């Protein structure tokens, strides 16, 4: 149950009145709702913290490594770091302003306690390889709390157990080790599979709980004063980064939160951006639509660059573009659908012996989509290059040569059938959006050549571009629906067609694109949300409404000058975020439950670009 | 002959480092000698690795000179004798040098006398360096046998 409540805290003679969203944490079969999670991270990995204080997801040392806390995917055997009052309580949460540091306030009949969670950032001094810090501060009264760390290395498959080594609770397996430290948080007891304690937090007291992780090196035992200093430095670093963001348009809070989510998903060692920090959160509860999103998709390249550049994240944009061309070098001229965060192309898919989120199996790691043909990727990559060239004013000669090679490759393969942007596992077909993006690829190649940034057979690019246009206009448009269609010689619709407007396949106000936008909303709209498509996709069950598509609709409206419609829809969509401003991949249109991996980079990218498009149109 | 020890010490350290790094990549051990040495000098991780590698090679050369001295006293050298020295060296390193002596002189490594709140500490290696992984003693022995054999071989060859 959720409600707004005016709450008063008496403290040291002063009365603080705060308006808070206070919610009693609940679970279903041991699983928190996806909407109930918040994300913290350090640019290398991400942890998910449930509203009830349990950290149910953390992969170490990196975002795409095996999980140490995996209760998100197996409530009984996945492992977690629980921390909560031992008496009935309500919880309210927020991120410290401008940061990825989470603050949860538990309120009980006996008092209140504030928990600050962060993955600390490396600062000066000797810090652990990875460090998770939980600071527990008594705010009012006296609150009895309990904490328990149940590490389960290697997605719970490692037999390693917690042992006390010189008074330090430690678990180790091969290359990885983890130690748990506590200060003023009770007398820790180590049992076979966990370490934990009970304690009371009185007003004014501060306790610390720390997980120090090592990978291919000895564990670093943190010092309490430095832990506190690192926590403050971490918040300050995030705040500094936020202050540097240049966006001053509408929905600023939502845009800034989305930027901070993107920054969490940037894998700092390489510059790659993960689609999401989780695997196998289901698109349908109990279903098989469970995928590993801890990879970087070149398909998102143009969205990403546009979002990063609009926010003034030039160093991140540089790094991502360089990573993109470096990673795709291994498969040149083919651009693979996805790459690992370190740029390697392998993504072999396998299933884990985990119960799955609320029984949603299989739990997959790796992603079989890596081997698919998706023609739209080429349009995104060349559109991203054009975006980058517009910003940088130039293109590296080596990059330009490779981009020209990609354009040549598009001329050869655009006639092929593909799996499409949604990575369907049914038979390949001629997806309209794929063809549109092939057109965009050659269009941008011609434009870059016109600017003297690309050398190649421009006549061929131009000729093939017009052939693609002819294919789309004659075979991918249904007069009786007054809309482009999902695929050639079909009459079904697809929300991806909105990308025709966004990627400037044609003038956004061309009659056909304008009608298509209306048709997509009419047929696929569920309130403010959009389904991706209604067709069979080779998988059992049905997914929810795709958040990014809904924001694409906003952007399409904005690019067509329909600003009232855009702003109204934007308001509705921004209200659908969870209490700390995060989105999953999908939302159940009936219940507003989140579905799919979380938090989803594409959803937040689409939000940033939609808000930016409205701001630009208003200017 | 002494040049054989110096060259052998350099090549031997190169091989020893490579073997231990490979063992780390295979998940056999978390031991990282340059990291252990470097963090005795600086808390900066990147600088620690650089300093640690440099010092590790210096120590490798110094140990080669110790081997050379013993070879000279025995008036005998060779791959097998060097390998035997390497085995003894590994046992000494894992039971006394790294396990006992290093924590005493290392400002950031824990000993039984430290409380975790006093200063940032490194996980101590434990007997036979087992805290860094169950295969650590094996990896250490193999790496040092290679080292000793190479030093012994070079000394005999130069000799």
Image (spheres, rainbow, N blue to C red):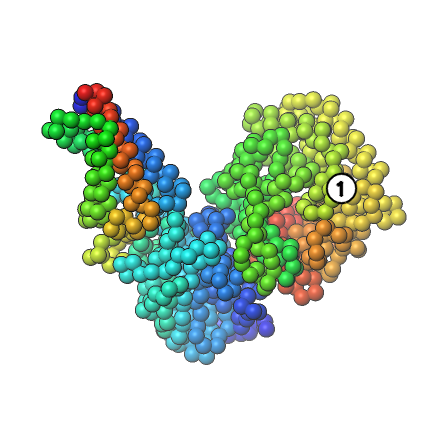
Which residue in the rendered view is the most extreme toward the right?
Answer: A480
Is residue A184 shown to the viewer in this render?
Answer: yes
Q: Nearer the viewer, residue A564 or A426?
A: A426
On screen, residue A510 versus residue A193, left or right, reads right
Q: Nearer the viewer, residue B6 or A333?
A: B6
Q: Nearer the viewer, residue A474 or A510?
A: A474
Q: Is residue A401 placed above or below A547 in the rendered structure?
A: above
Q: Is residue B102 placed above or below A471 in the rendered structure?
A: below
Q: Crowding at label 1, few (<14), some or many (≥20) Cα neighbours within 10 Å?
A: some
| Residue A97 location (% of width, % of height) | 49, 57
Residue A161 found in image quarter = bottom left
**At 59% across and 64% down in the image, what residue appears?**
A358
The subunit carrying tag 1 is A
Q: Quadrant of the N terminus of chain A?
A: bottom right
On screen, residue A369 versus residue A564, left or right, reads left
**At 23% across and 21% down in the image, what residue appears?**
B157
Location of mark 1 (residue): A429
| Residue A562 location (% of width, % of height) | 75, 50
On screen, residue A284 versus residue A199, left or right, reads right
């Amino acid at each position: 149950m959720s409600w707004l409540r005016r709450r008063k805290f008496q403290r040291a003679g002063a009365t603080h009145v705060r308006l808070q969203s206070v919610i009693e944490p609940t679970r279903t079969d041991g699983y928190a709702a996806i909407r109930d999670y918040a994300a913290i991270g350090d640019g290398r990995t991400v942890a998910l913290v449930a509203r009830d204080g349990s950290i149910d997801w953390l992969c170490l040392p990196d975002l795409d490594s095996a999980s140490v806390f995996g209760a998100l995917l197996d409530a009984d055997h996945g492992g977690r770091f629980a921390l909560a009052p031992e008496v009935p309580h309500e919880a309210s949460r927020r991120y410290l302003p401008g940061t990825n540091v989470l603050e949860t306030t538990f309120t009980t009949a006996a008092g209140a306690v504030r928990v600050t969670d962060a993955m600390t950032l490396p600062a000066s001094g000797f810090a652990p390889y990875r460090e998770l810090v939980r600071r527990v501060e008594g705010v009012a009264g006296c609150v009895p709390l309990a904490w328990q760390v149940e590490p389960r290395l290697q997605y719970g498959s490692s037999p390693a157990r917690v042992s006390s080594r010189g008074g330090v609770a430690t678990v180790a397996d091969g290359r990885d080790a983890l130690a748990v430290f506590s200060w003023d948080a009770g007398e820790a007891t180590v049992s076979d599979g966990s370490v934990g304690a009970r304690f009371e937090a009185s007003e004014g007291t501060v306790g610390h709980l720390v997980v120090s992780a090592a990978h291919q090196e000895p564990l670093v035992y943190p010092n309490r004063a430095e832990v506190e200093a690192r926590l403050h430095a971490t918040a300050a670093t995030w705040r500094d980064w936020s202050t540097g963001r240049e966006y001053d348009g509408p929905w600023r809070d939502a845009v800034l939160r989305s930027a901070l989510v993107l920054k969490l998903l940037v894998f700092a060692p390489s510059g790659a951006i993960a689609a999401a920090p989780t695997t196998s959160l289901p698109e349908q509860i109990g279903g098989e639509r469970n995928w590993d999103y801890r990879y970087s998709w070149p398909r998102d390249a143009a969205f990403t660059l546009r979002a990063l550049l609009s926010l003034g994240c030039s160093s991140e944009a540089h790094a991502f573009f360089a990573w993109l061309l470096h990673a795709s070098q291994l498969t040149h001229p083919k651009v693979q659908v996805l790459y690992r965060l370190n740029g390697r192309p392998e993504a072999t898919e396998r299933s884990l012996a985990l119960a799955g989120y609320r029984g949603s199996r299989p739990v997959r790691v790796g992603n079989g989509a890596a081997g698919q043909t998706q023609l739209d990727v080429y349009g995104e990559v060349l559109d991203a290059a054009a975006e980058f060239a517009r910003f940088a004013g130039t293109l590296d000669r080596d990059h330009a040569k490779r981009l020209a090679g990609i354009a040549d490759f598009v001329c050869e393969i655009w006639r092929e059938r593909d799996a499409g942007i949604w990575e369907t596992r049914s038979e390949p077909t001629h997806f309209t959006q794929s063809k549109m993006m092939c057109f965009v690829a050659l269009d941008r190649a011609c434009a870059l050549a016109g600017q003297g940034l690309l050398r190649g057979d421009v006549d061929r690019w131009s000729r093939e571009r017009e052939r693609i246009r002819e294919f789309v206009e004659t075979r991918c448009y249904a007069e009786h629906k007054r809309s482009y269609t999902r695929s050639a010689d079909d009459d079904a619709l697809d929300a991806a067609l909105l990308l025709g407007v966004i990627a400037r396949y044609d003038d956004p106000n061309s009659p056909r694109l304008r009608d298509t936008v209306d048709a997509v909303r009419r047929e696929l709209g569920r309130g403010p949300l959009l389904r991706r498509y209604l067709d069979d996709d080779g998988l059992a069950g049905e997914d929810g409404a795709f958040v990014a598509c809904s924001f694409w609709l906003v952007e399409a409206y904005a690019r067509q000058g329909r600003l009232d419609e855009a702003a109204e829809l934007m308001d509705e969509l921004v209200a659908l975020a969870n209490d700390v401003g995060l989105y999953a991949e999908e939302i159940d249109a009936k219940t507003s439950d989140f579905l799919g991996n979380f938090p989803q980079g594409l959803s937040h990218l689409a939000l940033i670009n939609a808000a930016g498009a409205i701001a630009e149109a208003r200017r | 002959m002494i040049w054989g020890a110096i060259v052998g010490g350099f090549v031997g350290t190169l091989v020893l480092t490579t073997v231990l790094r490979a063992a780390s990549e295979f998940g056999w051990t978390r031991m990282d000698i340059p990291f252990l040495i470097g963090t005795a000098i600086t808390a900066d991780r990147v600088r620690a690795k650089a300093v640690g590698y440099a010092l590790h090679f210096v120590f490798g050369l110094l140990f080669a000179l110790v081997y050379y001295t013993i070879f000279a006293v025995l008036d005998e050298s060779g791959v097998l004798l060097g390998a035997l020295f390497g085995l003894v060296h590994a046992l000494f390193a894992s039971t006394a040098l790294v396990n006992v002596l290093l924590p005493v002189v290392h400002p950031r490594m824990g000993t039984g006398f430290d409380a975790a709140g006093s200063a940032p500490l490194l996980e101590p290696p434990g007997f036979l360096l087992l805290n860094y992984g169950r295969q650590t003693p094996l990896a250490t022995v193999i790496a040092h046998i290679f080292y000793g054999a190479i030093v012994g071989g070079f000394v005999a060859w130069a000799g």
